[in-house]
Amino acid sequence: MATQATRLIEVHPSPPPPCGTQTFPPLSWPWPGSESAEQSQVERALTWESAQAPLCLNCSTLPGDRSLGARSPVPCNDSKALGPFDPQDLNLTDEELRLKYLGPQQTELFVPICVTYLLIFVVGAVGNALTCAVILRHRAMRTPTNYYLFSLAVSDLLVLLLGLPLELYEMWRNYPFLLGAGGCYFRTLLFETVCLASVLNVTALSVERYVAVVHPLQARSVVTHTHVRRVLGVVWGLALLCSLPNTSLHGIRQLDVPCRGTVPDSAVCTLVRRRALYNLVVQATALLFFCLPMATISVLYLLIGLRLRRDRLLILRQEAKGRARTSDGRRLQPLQDRSRTQVTKMLFALVVVFGICWAPFHIDRLMWSLVSRWTEGLHLAFQYVHVVSGVFFYFSSAANPVLYSLMSSRFRDTFREALCLGTRCRRHGPHRSSHSLSRVTTGSTLCDTGSPGSRAQPLAENGGPEGRQETEPSREEPQAASP
């Protein structure tokens, strides 16, 4: 991670005064007029100037963006001075100054984190690319629900293809930041936008699934292509708008040592505005884009689960009374019950994935914004939280394809047919592919509930046995709501 550009030097063991106050060097330093004859005029000037510099210690490190790297104490954001002058800095090379104030150039855990990130990159990029390819390639897959899945997959691909490689480079070389101020703004804007858009996408998808399952009659007029396009436009526009405050707080900062000037190759992309503003943005984001969506999604999926359970009991009563006497009727209801049971289990798994993947990200930010005085133990704990939050941040981009492939064989079959992989697909030709896609697109009304947490969504499927009943929309969930 690109660390803060500067840190202060402790010139005496006594506790430092609050940030922004005036302090004076210890009495052991010669004052003007009492120095030895050997002291040069430059040293006298530097000593006197250092007495006027504001001392700002006990300031915490900045998690800032999603990058990982060395940590070092930093000055308060409203203090432009590095701090009291250290005469030893005059004898240090530029490389030694960067190491002293910015820390190591390479992250200590670079190798294991790099291996983990590369694995996530491969799985996430392939899974989300397949999701987009299936929806774009087959007209039957361009349904309202799949539009949400496509939007989520696009946001994940942006993170994996643009954000993750940049972070790997920064872990390899924490400084200097080579993309300039424009690149710093773009990186911050990218991460913030896709994070907010992902949460809003999942929330909108959850609402759509709630309407389709619990209020199927209303879904005929609400869940339409036009409506979904408008919702997605609002989602991305709102995400972009809400990401601007945090983006405006970041910029390029360089290491500026008193009497040495700006140190070459020390530029970092970090917070350049007041910390209080950043704290406010972080806390508001955690509340509005994690706590409230998590609570909303949990309630919606609880209601969906209750509706599925009630319908299952109704089916059992009908079978017990012998009302379903036709062969089609007797076959349809048990299969619907089996599909809905699997959906309930999948919803629970997706809620857990959402909490696991996104909680460390917000804990990381809240921990930095709420802790005012850092002890060695807190700093060590924060480093571990920061590493874990980064891993799970990217893992969320690859979690859904893996989760769906583990829970349903039809997910794998759909991708295999969409890309026409293997001899079986070529041997059966278009007829098999068309039949299977019809099963998935019409049957997914029961189970294409979307992920409550992860951002990328694979194709939905009900996971039930193959057959004619899955090509017919149920009475309770009309075809208009089917993805």
Image (cartoon, grey):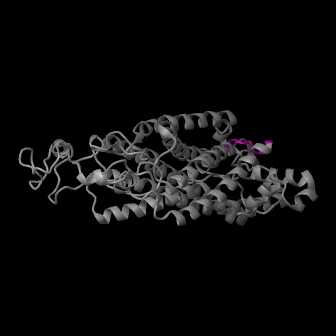
Q: Please name the residue shown 67% across and 63% down the image.
A: 317
**Left or right for 63, reference 79:** right
Depth order, front residue of 304/185: 185
Can the viewer see residue 357 in this picture?
A: no
Q: Kindly indicate the quadrant of the structure image that contains residue 224.
A: top right
Q: How many marks?
A: 0
The structure residue drawn at horizontal position 19% and vertical position 55%, both measured from the top left corner, is 11
Q: Position of residue 195 (x, y in %)?
A: 52, 46
Identify the residue at horizontal 70%, vertical 50% (top origin). Answer: 129
Viewer-nearest residue: 280 or 42: 42
Does the magenta segment cover residue 162?
Answer: no
Examine the rendering and report whether any part of residue 125 can be seen: yes
Judge from the rendering whether residue 213 lies leftward or rightward of residue 382; answer left or right: right
Q: Residue 143 lies in magenta, yes or no?
A: yes
* Residue 343, above or below 227: below
Image spot of residue 462 (x, y percent): 71, 58
Residue that protrudes farthest toward the front in the picture: 37
Rendered location of residue 325, percent (x, y)? 81, 61
- State whether residue 184 is above or below residue 120: above
Residue 442 position within the rendered picture, expressed as x and y whole percent measured from the top left: 76, 49
The quadrant where residue 211 appears = top right
Span shown in magenta: 139-144
State which quarter of the image contains the N terminus: bottom left
Asked if 307 appears above or below 376 in the picture, the reply is above
Q: Main secondary structure of the magenta part?
A: helix
The residue lying furthest to the left in this view is 34
Is residue 117 or residue 414 the one in the foreground? 117
Asked whether 105 or 134 is in front, the reply is 105
On screen, residue 291 versus residue 228, left or right, reads left
Tell me: 6 left or right of 440: left
